[in-house]
Image (cartoon, rainbow, N blue to C red):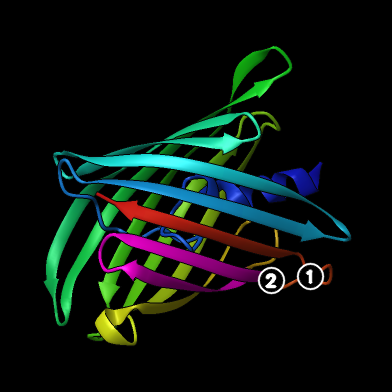
Amino acid sequence: MRHAFVFSLVLVTCAAEAGRPLQADDAAVMDPHACELEGAHGDWRLDGGGQRQTSLQLGCGIGWGSEVALNAIRPRELALNGKTMLASTAWADGDAQLTLGWSLSHRHVETAWRRSSAGLTLIGSAPLTRDLTLHANFGHQRDELLQRRSTTWALAVEHGGFGEGGRWQPMAEVFGDDRGKPWANAALRVAVLPDRLFVDASYGRQFAGARARLKTAGFKLAF
């Protein structure tokens, strides 16, 4: 039962697409009428067992500094996610932003749809240098099916990109919750078509004796 709860916490941001391929989200909000189609596959392993999750999400900017997204998660889960900009201020090498993110999920259990999770996350992003951006998350998640709550956190650094047009975009993070050991995650995003089509992958390990691991792969199409 504990493994199921840990899995749901680790992949809750993956299910919401977060700042793919990071588990941490970024504070940026899509412009009105701008949309993104995102797909992701996550593979979580521990002690020879594990679970897999595949998702497809469509999100759009709706104005008022907000965006919403509908995410279909296999097997049998739907999530409604969103972000609203709380503050934005000029920084030395760009803008520092503070955003409130939220998520609400329903899962098909036996013969009915039941609310499976809900959460709120405070998201901050600020440039460290011209090429590096820091993302910090602090949130609260509730697994409705297991009737458990947890405080979640994440700290990530993202590079603006190497190569022509900043095509290769590496990033790294640590993340976790108040119920287990933290995780370390390394990720890479590749711009196939600048500002339009991206593919990504990540690999993470938990700082624990069992050495749980998480692998993800995905894509994003902006239009």
Magenta: main secondary structure? strand
In the image, which disc is placed on residue 89? none
Name the residue nearer the viewer: 205 or 182. Answer: 205
List the residue tagged with mark 2.
Answer: 205
Amino acid of disc 1: Arg
Residue farthest toward the left in the current orientation of the protein: 90
Count of numbered circles in the view: 2
On the image, which quarter does residue 178 sit in? bottom right
Q: Is residue 45 found inside the magenta-colored segment of the image?
A: no
Mark 2 vs 1: CB contact within 8 A: yes
Mark 2 and mark 1 lie on one chain; the one further toward the N terminus is 2
Q: Nearer the viewer, residue 82 or 75?
A: 75
The quarter of the picture where the N terminus appears is top right
Q: Which residue is mark 1?
A: 211
Q: Which residues are magenta?
A: 183-204
Q: In which quadrant of the rendered view does residue 115 lie? A: top right
Query: Observer-nearest residue: 63 or 134?
Result: 63
Q: Amino acid at mark 2?
A: Arg
